[in-house]
Amino acid sequence: MEHLAYTPRGTLVPHRPLAELTWLRVGGPADWFFQPQDEDDLRAFLAALPGDVAVFPMGVGSNLIVRDGGIHAVVIRLGRGFNTISVEGDTVAAGAAALDAHVARRAAEAGRDLTFLRTIPGSVGGAVRMNAGCYGSYVADHLIAARVVLRSGAVAELGPAELALAYRSSTLPEGAVIVSAQFRAEAGDPAALAQRMEEQIARRDASQPTKERSAGSTFRNPAGFSSTGRADDVHDLKAWKVIDDAGMRGARRGGAQMSEMHSNFLINTGGATAADLEGLGEEVRKKVLQTQGISLQWEIMRVGEY
């Protein structure tokens, strides 16, 4: 980062290994890795960064495969200073680095219902970027606006319409970094909300390999919505069901495996490379397409060089 006209106050390091920062524990290094001290530091850094240098915002790596060749970009990861949570009336404000589970708990303590966030792995920035959701609730249902630092260093407030939030997707501008978000949350009894979250955790732990190295759901549900969690939920077009029907539950490639417990979870059983994990996922996609004519779409983000 020679000739950069701005000296960051945060941490800027070259060739930073990224594997330890992802839940799957795979992947090569970032050309540069930047942890801004605060929003002003981030804005000044991006404004000074040459326009031809790519930027990749990274959360806690819960929904990510970094390929073995690493990322030819400046990876920006928000840390302390971007993880505050506050509740005022029906509005819950959270920094992009705040964990979804922490936001749900803090809101519940204040008598506000964002319980759907409790079982979603990751941080607020990623939840907004992917319109995260479960049990029939999505970020789009609650988001007032996200505060974003654009690639130019300018700041914008983007609402659900500007972000075009859809099932597991948004139109966040290229190179933009979400720094915080505001959510509207209905009132609820703190004890009842806490109880509901305990039940959600128990249900998740009973059906998902939460003790394994995974990145959450591997593929989007072909049905185009997440599980409702209700007894009348249908499974015809659930990703796990079509993977089962293709005979790929428990399938392996190197150190990668489709979980025996939940076949839409891709796990690193130990020693997997990013190529093992992505390759197995592509094998599953091919088999599902061959056997059922359904083209599974990745939910896990895959980035970097092979």
Image (cartoon, rainbow, N blue to C red):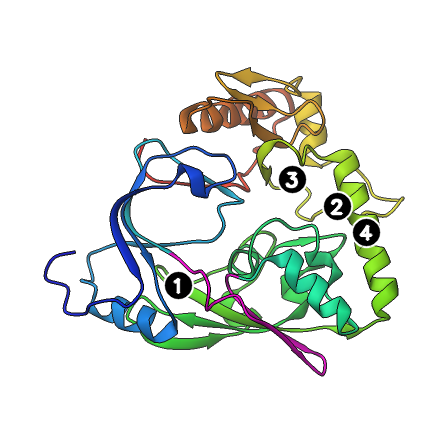
The residue carrying mark 2 is: 227
Q: Position of residue 166 (x, y in %)?
A: 59, 57
Q: CA distance from mark 1 to mark 4?
A: 36 Å
Q: Nearer the viewer, mark 1 or mark 4?
A: 4
User: Residue 126, can we see it?
Assistant: yes
Comes first in the chain, label 3 or label 1:
1
- Which image quarter: residue 241? top right
Comes first in the chain, label 2 or label 3:
3
Quadrant for the C terminus in the image: top left
**Looking at this rendering, what residue extends furthest in the bottom direction?**
89
User: Residue 236, can we see it?
Assistant: no
SS of the residue under disc 3: loop
The residue carrying mark 3 is: 222
* Nearer to us in this view, 121 or 136: 121
Q: Amino acid at mark 4?
A: Glu
User: Residues in magenta?
Assistant: 77-97
Please report the residue visible at 27 percent of the width from the left and 56 percent of the height from the top: 12
